[in-house]
Image (spheres, rainbow, N blue to C red):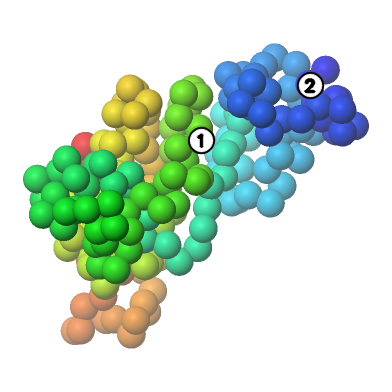
């Protein structure tokens, strides 16, 4: 019923109430709505979600909050930085910045509105813009994950895609690669959390 109403323009899935119906696995959502909602989303997420649906019969709602060229700091609430022992010294006012970026700018508009909804996991594809500060990413990436889990009061899975191992910034085994360093930071996050 929800699927048909949505496809005919009679149902608005943008409200919190209606979105929650889809996210919690409404049994009357069908594959047409599933395909329509995610036709322009990342292929990896679509394929994995479709696999879960086919194996379990549980519809998977996908929220794509994405913005290319951003840094992890923008996706992390400023409170997380203020309360962390590592970054608190940089957060002395509401206008404080870390490496020229005001923490939480994107979080507030693209993630915070979903607080209170039930989520079952995150698939994260970000890192190119932090590659030049991969050592700092060892702390900022797990800080963001821990903060999000705390806000949802749930240790939900947090999957992440590692940057490809190709000639990023002319890196090689002799000169090193900032992307390889970022992959290491992601791996250390996986081990720590």
Q: Residues within 10 Å of mark 2 (few under 14, many from 20)?
A: many
Instruction: Work out whether residue 146 or residue 14 is closer to the camera in this orientation and state it.
Output: 14
Residue 98 position in % (x across, y down): 24, 62
Residue 167 position in % (x across, y down): 37, 79
Based on the displayed image, in which of its 4 quarters is residue 8 positioned? top right
Secondary structure beneath dot 1 equals: helix
**Which disc number belongs to residue 113?**
1
In the rendered image, the vertical position of residue 35 relative to residue 176, given as above or below? above
In this rendering, does residue 163 appear at all?
Answer: no
Residue 50 position in % (x across, y down): 63, 35
- How many labels were placed on the picture? 2
**Which disc number belongs to residue 2?**
2
Q: Residues within 10 Å of mark 1 (few under 14, many from 20)?
A: few
Using residue 91 as the reference point, say whether residue 127 is left or right of it: right
The residue shown at (61%, 43%) is 46
Residue reaching furthest top?
Answer: 27
Residue reaching furthest right?
Answer: 8
Based on the displayed image, in which of its 4 quarters is residue 49 positioned? top right
Using residue 150 as the reference point, say whether residue 34 is left or right of it: right
The residue shown at (44%, 44%) is 108
Q: Are marks 2 and 1 in contact (CB under 8 Å)?
A: no
**Which disc number belongs to residue 33?**
none
Secondary structure beneath dot 2 equals: helix
Please state, as top left, top right, bottom left or bottom right, where the N terminus lies in the image: top right
Please state, as top left, top right, bottom left or bottom right, where the C terminus lies in the image: top left
Residue 142 position in % (x across, y down): 24, 45
Q: Earlier in the sequence, mark 2 or mark 1?
A: 2
Using residue 8 as the reference point, say whether residue 160 is left or right of it: left
In this rendering, does residue 96 appear at all?
Answer: yes
Using residue 154 as the reference point, say whether residue 37 is left or right of it: right
Based on the displayed image, in which of its 4 quarters is residue 95 positioned? bottom left
């Amino acid at each position: 019923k929800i699927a048909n109403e949505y496809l005919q323009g009679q149902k608005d899935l943008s409200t919190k109430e209606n979105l929650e119906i889809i996210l919690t696995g409404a049994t009357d959502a069908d594959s047409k709505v599933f395909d329509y909602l995610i036709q322009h989303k990342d292929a990896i997420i679509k394929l994995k979600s479709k696999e879960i649906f086919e194996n379990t019969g549980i519809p998977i709602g996908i929220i794509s909050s994405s913005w290319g060229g951003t840094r992890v700091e923008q996706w992390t609430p400023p409170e997380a930085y203020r309360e962390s022992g590592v970054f608190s010294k940089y957060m002395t006012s509401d206008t404080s910045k870390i490496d020229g970026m005001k923490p939480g700018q994107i979080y507030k508009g693209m993630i915070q509105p979903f607080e209170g909804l039930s989520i079952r996991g995150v698939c994260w594809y970000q890192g190119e813009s932090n590659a030049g500060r991969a050592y700092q990413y060892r702390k900022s990436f797990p800080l963001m994950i821990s903060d999000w889990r705390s806000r949802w009061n749930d240790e939900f899975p947090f999957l992440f895609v590692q940057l490809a191992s190709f000639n990023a910034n002319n890196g090689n085994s002799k000169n090193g690669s900032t992307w390889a360093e970022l992959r290491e930071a992601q791996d250390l996050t996986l081990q720590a959390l």
